[in-house]
Amino acid sequence: MVEPRMLKLWLGIIILFITCLSIAAGAFVGFNIGTDLSNLPSATDVVAILKAHQITHVRLFDADAHMLTALADTGIEVMVSVTNEEILGIGQTPSVAAAWVNKNVAAFVPSTNITAIAVGSEVLTTIPNAARILVPAMNYLQKALVASNLNDQIKVSTPQSMDVIPRPFPPSTAAFNSTWNSTIFQMLQFLKNTNSYYMLNAYPYYGYVNSNGIFPIDYALFRPLSSVKEIVDPNTLLHYDSMFDAMVDATYNSIAAFNISGIPVVVTETGWPWLGGANEQDATVENAETFNNNLIRRVSNDSGPPSQPDIPINTYIYELFNEDKRPGPISERNWGIFFPNGSTVYPISLGSSVNVSTNSSGVFCIAKQDADSKKLQNGLNYACGQGQGNCSAIQTGQPCYFPDTLQNHASYAYNDYYQKMHTFGGTCDFDGTATTTSQDPSYGSCKFTGSSSTSGRGLFPPPALGPVGPSSQGSSVRAFSFGFLLVVFLSVVMADVSISMSL
């Protein structure tokens, strides 16, 4: 008979292997979805944009039923939010917390892949009088999840701004504002006990603007620094290539100051505005494009900040759309990556959402950037009509409908016509509105005719193995290696147990 102590030992080792497997899954980049805009697309259209660009993680600033319904059966991981206005009631009465979970979470899972609840937004710095009920609210929500048997799938945390760390540099000496010591200590204990993670809103844009020239803008934009401008922590001698990494490390060191470890940091908000007022000269399209594309590359390398290199920095970009109803300076209304019609404000590389390859001829036909709109429409009509192009993919609800722009639709139609007709004399001209390219214009699930890329990967990467921050995408090679080792290891364990039972 197998000794209980031996079984516990094996079980512990198995859990360790599973944990390693989930860590190996790598980092993801998600998006915040705000709704404070005058022409908000329907929930169905929003989800179509997400799917077209293979966005696998989103954070909602509330728990909108229409969005949660539209996200059902997509595989997209969803973080729902308790608004700051709802915290008071939830933090004072367990029954209110239970009702909130039943209405906004339990009613939608498992069809909608809800994986986290964000309790409020920057509560300590925006509504400090609610600090006393913040952790009770988190506890009541956690108990409601336990009662619904959802606590293993869904984690509870609360996003905080960098303002809770008054002196973030150098990161090695960073510490939380002592005013909130009691609340933060209780919060960290909660996160540790529930295997959750710290939610951080980190904006290098504000860090740079408010630094009065102390830090170079290249440091904020992930650009390479010259040797004379390198940023080094004088206490640890760790080099920081970006302000983003320094902010995350400052948070890890602030947590460590409480003698608490093992809590991953997830960046729930970061980004850069692309338009500002006369006194916001750093809010430009060029800077926003540089920051967000470099951010995606940074997160996608699956490494952590200098003090925690093995913990990937899962990150949510702020934000999907420009929220034109938001009060404040002009920059406050121009953080979005997409316009409501699905087109991008500036070119953005979303990693796995873009497949670059070539067709058999190595040439695609697409619409010119500066083409006359009337000529484009005529060309589109010809390609889909007399030219007998298959234009079903650019119809509403189909994979190439978004971005819903004349140029995008014309490019798809032009290329479909060209791939079928160029061997019979068909040209890529369309009254001067078209041009050829060797770069495959396919994106997400939208595959242009002639693309050699396959669709075997599907729309979305595999779902998360566990909330290690949480983490759902990453190196398939490492995931396979760990998975293979786990299978072999479990086989050995089962063999050992069988032998032990036979003795």
Image (cartoon, rainbow, N blue to C red):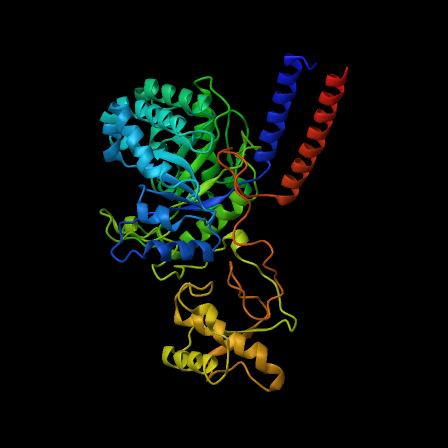
Q: Nearer the viewer, residue 464 or 468?
A: 464
In this rendering, position of residue 238 left or right of residue 48: right
Quadrant position of residue 148: top left
Q: Which of 103 and 273 is in front in this view?
A: 103
The answer to whether one can see residue 53 in this image is: yes
Q: Is residue 94 above or below residue 306?
A: above
Q: In this view, does 417 lie above or below 83?
A: below
Quadrant position of residue 177: top left
- Expressed as whole percent of the image width and height from the top left, the position of residue 82 reads 30, 35
In this rendering, position of residue 498 left or right of residue 45: right
The answer to whether one can see residue 203 in this image is: no
* Quadrant location of the C terminus in the rendered image: top right
Residue at the location (37% across, 19% down)?
186
- Expressed as whole percent of the image width and height from the top left, the position of residue 438 reads 59, 70
Q: Is residue 114 above or below residue 338?
A: above
- Expressed as whole percent of the image width and height from the top left, the position of residue 174 reads 42, 25
Residue at the location (63% across, 29% down)?
17
Quadrant position of residue 132: top left
Q: Nearer the viewer, residue 402 or 325?
A: 402
